[in-house]
Image (cartoon, rainbow, N blue to C red):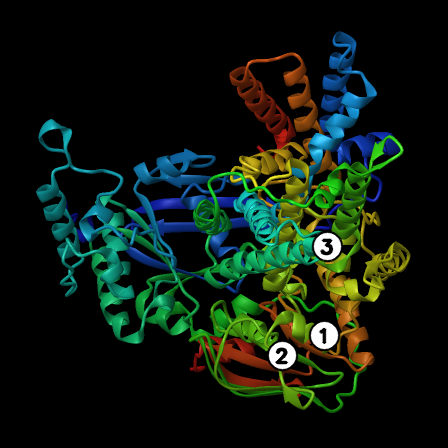
Amino acid sequence: MVSISKNSLSNQTILTLKHIEKSFGGIHALAGVLFDLRAGEIHALVGENGAGKSTLIKIITGAYTPDRGIIEINGTTYDSLRPTQARELGIAAVYQEFNLLPELSVAENISLGDQPLGRLSLIDMKRRCDRAYELLEHLGAETHIDPNELVKYLTIGEQQLVEIAKALAINARILIMDEPSAVLPSRDLDRLFAVIRALRDDGRGIIYISHRLNEVFELADRVTVLKDGQTMATKNINDTHNAELVSLMVGRPWTDMYPPKDNTPGDILLDVDKLCAEGTVFDVSFNVRAGEVVGMAGLGGSGRTTVCRTLVGLGAIRSGQITYMGKPAARSPAAAARVGLVLVPEDRKAFGLVLNQSMRFNLSLPNLSKFLQMGVLRSQPEKEAIKKTISDMQIKPPTPEISTENMSGGNQQKIVVGKWLLANPKLVIFDEPTRGVDVGAKAEIYMRIRELTRQGVGVIMASSELPELIGLSDRILVFHEGRLAGEVERADFSEEAIMRLATATELA
Amino acid sequence: MAVTYQSTRDHPMPRPSQWSKFFRNNASIILIYAIILLVIGTAAISNENFRTPSNLLNILRQSIIIGLIAIGQSIVVLTGGMDMSVAQVARIVGLTVATIFAAQDSNPAMILPLILLGLVMGTLLGAFNGLLITRTHANPFIITFGIASILRGVNLAISTTPIRGIPASYLHIYDFKIGIIPANVLVMALMWVIAYLFTTRTRTGRALFAVGGSERVAQLSAIRYNRTLVISYILCSISAAIAGLFLLSRTGVGDPSAAEGMDFQSIVAVALGGISLYGGKGSMVGTLGGVLLLASLSNVFNLLQVNIYYQQLLLGLIVLVTVAAYKSPRSA
């Protein structure tokens, strides 16, 4: 490995992004991002879910082509990059999901794209092994990883180091780390930080993404805050503090999209007692009353979605109890729906819609028993129910036979919501009900949620969008790393209070 | 999140006419029936033996057994699965019933109980397939292929020579006629109507499409995923069992090579009919077209005395061309 002395390259800008824009189907994921990275610095990138961090990474690594803006690397300007080109320019990323082949050895994984060849063009196994050893050694920390060990026998922390070694193997000068600490047990954190610092001292530029602000302050030299696809600020770490970053991350104008609160909570519908599920949710207790909106906040991987899924019977309960209307809760979505407990899932394309089927098919699916007469589906009641839902939800175009895959995100989401409202539920769980939908559809969904509570239906709303949680909830449960970090009452609602619980940061 | 209003296409481009919509939505079905008309038309013009009413009825009769099996196969393929055991199920039912008839000195009183036995065997074998698939989460192709292999062994153990001693009245089931129309063709027509109504107008039928479309979505839409799968394999095996009973009535002997090749043929019929082999898409009307196309082709080949090797070759080409034509450029 060539080691470059710290001083020769430090402060030299190696990557600059100017006015990067990228939209998906009318939604701006990035709306003019400014960002720069210097050699020999750790530059933290923070922002709420959906702020555009992942999109930005994908643009730097060449996975996405920006709509507008320029990328400048080592003084050369590009409109966009191709993935191979980005690699050649020395850009590498370590994602939360590792790109390793578990059945191959450490050395094989590290040299996968570029096998050292020996005589007869056969792979030189010794050289491959030496190279892996050298790269792992270079990480500087006490790694003790055997290059001949199969990757599947390594710990998560060790696998991550192999990923980093892979980046070194292509001599990456720009290393992107996407929430590297999120997957690690806390005892491995110090080693990771030491490795990252060593790489910086090598003169590499590191983009470090994390939700944990205390890490940012421990590790980073500079920090950039993204919000709604825009750069809010770039600060030297010594010139800022926790509270400022939190308010930059959440501080957005208040909108009056939220219908006024006019519900009165009634009896307890659902009671969750010390729930542990799927090894990712621990000791969670809460209850939901009729006619009440209980918000669930928490960053990605906080266990929010697992709780929602467990409530309708998906995934195993390790311990604890879920009581719904005085009885143990059903253990399958079909059984839960029969007693009026339904989930409007996150990610409508993966969980909400049978995409190659019509709107009518999808709206009817959970409601087929309503249209049955002696075991035969009657088309008249079906047509009427569908027509009513389309007009209630304002779904456009109002054509029952249209294939759902051709509809906009907002209208797709209205179908997922509409199909469950048609089922006359008593408790509706919404998981990310407005992700990726336009403003009009958002307002429509908020109105439906209000209407439900007026009718005495209980609502759980899990969301990454704090304004909507604050706008609609009666109280908000905040999750952090699989546990309930706290509950915020309506009187105490503020984005800062929620973010502080969700990121487990103490305000200085 | 910064959002812009999205055009929801209130006023789509020039509104397509009802007809063009009909063509677009039923392209694969229209295609298969057009090919059938082409085949039949060409044959009718060029060969006078083909256009006799008795030959045309023959085509319908030849499509009964494969049709029954294809109905069951369609149900399973709609869920995204595949049943490779249908031919062996049909065969084991035929051989078992024939063996018992022979042992009971061709007693006609055994007809009804043995038909019931055949249906029960179909139900149990289908349940076995379905439960293995849902419990192990293994690929349906492999599971049913394994079952088929076991059944093939059992069938060889039952008999390697034709079993005689089927009561004459059992043979009448297949030969019964109403006027000049064979009753079996009418029964067949009724079966197709029931199959069509089952897939379009019952809850379980609707669930097949959901399950084939996406397991996760189906589950989260209150569809009982495992139950739907097991039912689909039971129905498939029952239809294979009925085919086996019919076949026994047609041939009059328990045939150890009965239904040979029907597993693949049924899948070909389903695929020709435009049912997606990934599940979730298609219609019984299409499968009927696939069955009729296979039956009329084999009829034409036989009349023209096409060499069996060329028959295979032509059939293969037609399958490839049709399936390639279904693949819309957008999904490519």
Q: Could you tell me the amino acid type at mark 2? A: Ala
B290 sits to left or right of A167: right
Q: Are marks 3 and 2 on the same chain?
A: no
SS for dot 1: helix
Q: Could you tell me the amino acid type at mark 3? A: Arg
How crowded pointer 2 is (Cα within 10 Å; few <14, some 14-19, many 20+) is rated as many
* Contact between labelled residues 2 and 3, with CB atoms less than 8 Å apart: no
Question: In the rendered structure, the residue with mark 3 lies on which chain?
Answer: B
> Which of disc 1 and disc 2 is earlier in sequence?
2
Residue drawn where x is 61% and y is 72% of the image? A332
- Looking at the picture, how far across and down is residue B59, in whole percent? 73, 27
Residue drawn where x is 76% and y is 13% of the image? B49
Q: Look at the picture and state if B55 lies above or below B141.
A: above
- Looking at the picture, how far across and down is residue B51, in whole percent? 80, 16
* Contact between labelled residues 1 and 2, with CB atoms less than 8 Å apart: yes
Q: Are marks 1 and 3 on the same chain?
A: no
Residue B244 position by quadrant: top right
Mark 3 or mark 2: which is in front?
3
Q: Which residue is mark 1?
A: A338
Q: Which residue is mark 3?
A: B206
Quick one: which residue is furthest to the top in this view? B46
A241 sits to left or right of B20: left
Q: Which residue is mark 2?
A: A330
Q: Which is nearer the eye, B78 or A363?
A: B78
SS for dot 2: loop
Q: Look at the picture and state if A218 lies above or below A129.
A: below
* Contact between labelled residues 3 and 1, with CB atoms less than 8 Å apart: no
A25 sits to left or right of A418: left
Residue A475 position by quadrant: bottom right
